[in-house]
Structure formats: structure tokens, C-alpha cells
Amino acid sequence: MLKIAVVGTGIIGINHLRAISKSKNCKLCAICDINKEAVASLAEEYHVPYFIDYKDIVHETDAEAVILNLPHWLHCEATQFFLDSGLHVLVEKPMANTVEECDCMIAAAERNNKKLAIGHVQRYFEANRKVKEIYESGELGELCMFTERRTTNYFAPNRPAWFLDKRLSGGGIVMNYGAHALDKLFYVMESEPTEIHAITGNIKNDSSIEGHAQIFIKFKNNVSANITFCGYGNSGYESIYYFTEGALKVTNTTELWKNTGKGWNKVDMENDEEHLLRQLEEFCKLVKGEPSTIPTGEYSRQIIKTIEQIYQQ
């Protein structure tokens, strides 16, 4: 079984711990977080040692891999450290703040012959997996357009301050949520952008990140995508895939609707909340050298490159 340490025990980190506890292919061997009280409590719950400094994991455990749930600006540094220390790495999206950082991470994986994966977890949501299945089946004809509208209170008081500093976060709503939207498109279509137009801005406050964006992308397969983000209030979230013979709509990431000209009908799916476990199992396959659907560093670099191009508009 693959021995895994988890660095960062926020909400996502805790969900990773739960996923590991359900896996038959790996086991938790250590937890790390700068919040000593919180990490000590989790370590007691999961019966593993805990650390405050992630570098101690390498010297004091037999970990073979690590899952990193850290602020964006630490992704490159921590990933390189663990790869250079001989561990495989699964790092949460976005991969890094810049393409240059992505290249450093990829190089570290190559020189150490270790696996690097990026946690674009929404591709493992049941609704998105079903979209890909229908797309590949051709039952709705050819895909021609995609739209996504996501609104949220991005500047909520409980958002950590580093998110609002572009030097640390790499960007605002596009970096954070655009990584999800782009991965869904790349995952479903397996196509790359050929043309990008975008407008980003912030009319809410004087932070260094953008709070809203409208993005238009044309892909190699001639599909066009229009992505709208607004971080000033929460009025909904939906993605729509327009085909020549119908449409698919995903609402709130979990519900899938189909329209073939007679109105929207809900697609029956299992109430599946095991997306992180599914991602974890794919990471284990990658480490073993088996075929895997988990995004690699090379793949995820393309997402950061696209985000950089959006910011350059």
C-alpha cells in the first residue's frame, strides 16, 4: 500500500484524510499543519504522527507520497522539496502561480523519476463524468458551444487574506475558479485553445486581484466557450454544453440536466460524493505506472498558461 502524508489540514485537507481512510490502495502515515492544536487533534483521530514543519516528514516517516493542500504561492517550493526528497506528489489546483513555476515542478519530477499530479477534482464529479460520457457517445451530436456562469461572494470576510494578494495567490477569481472551468473543458473535449479574449477587473475594493471576468475561448476543434465570473454576490452557478441535437446543463456542480428540444429533464445519477476517493485511486495508479486519468504536471501547465494568457488581455 502506498504510504501517504497530508500537508495542510483545512477543509480540503480533512476531506483528503477521509478519502485515504476509505482507500484500499494507500494508507495515511503522517499529517502536517502549522496549526498545532488542530493537527494534533486530527493526528489523534487518525492514529498517525503530526508535524508543524513539512520538511520533518521526509526525515521522520516512511512516507512514499504526499498530498499538498497549501496556499498557491507555496505549491512550487513544497512540490520541489518533496520530489527532490524522493516522494511522489499530488498538489491541489491550481498547479502554481506561473508557467515558470510549473516548469520547475515538472523538471523536479523528471530529474527524480517521481510522479507529479494535480488535483483538478471536479473532473471526478459524477455530473462531469456523465457529460464526458454523453459527449463521447455522440448521442447529442457535435458539441459547438459551452457557457459557464459562476457568481459568488469572493470577498467574504472568512476568505484568507493571502487570496486577495496577487503575489501570493497568482490571481483572483480566474486563477481560483477558472482552473476548474478550463479543466472541465480540456477533460471533456481533449482540445486546446487557439484564441482567447478576456476582460477582468475589480470594482469592489482595492485588492490586487480581479473580482470579475468575462472570457471567450476558441478551441482547436472549433468549439467556443464563454465563461463569466462575478465575485460580488451569490446568484447561482451553472455550466451549459450546447450540442447540435440538444444541450446538457450542470447546476451547482452536482446535478445534470438534458434538453433535446422538449425542456430540461434531470438525468438520474447516483448521489456520489466520493470524487476525492476516485481522484486518490487514480493517483495511486499513476504512481504504479498504470493508465490514469489524473492530471499530470504537463497537462496542468497548459491550464496555467491559458490563465496567464487571460490576464494578458
Image (tube, rainbow, N blue to C red):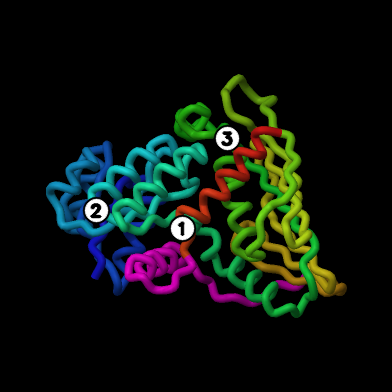
Q: Position of residue 158 (x, y in %)?
A: 48, 34
In contact (CB < 8 Å): disc 3 and disc 2: no
Residue underneath mark 1: 296
Between 159 and 298, which is closer to the camera in this rendering?
298
Check disc 3 and report its element: helix, strand or loop.
loop
N-terminal-most mark, 2 or 1 = 2
| Disc nearest the viewer among 3 and 2 | 2
Q: Can you tell which quarter of the image residue 239 is in?
A: bottom right
Residue underneath mark 3: 172
Q: Position of residue 261 (x, y in %)?
A: 87, 73
Q: Is residue 261 magenta?
A: no
Q: Amino acid at mark 2?
A: Gly
| Disc nearest the viewer among 3 and 1 | 1
| Segment tinted magenta in the rendering | 264-293
In the image, taking residue 52 as reference, residue 73 lies left or right, namely right
Q: Amino acid at mark 3?
A: Gly
Q: CA distance from mark 3 to mark 2?
A: 33 Å
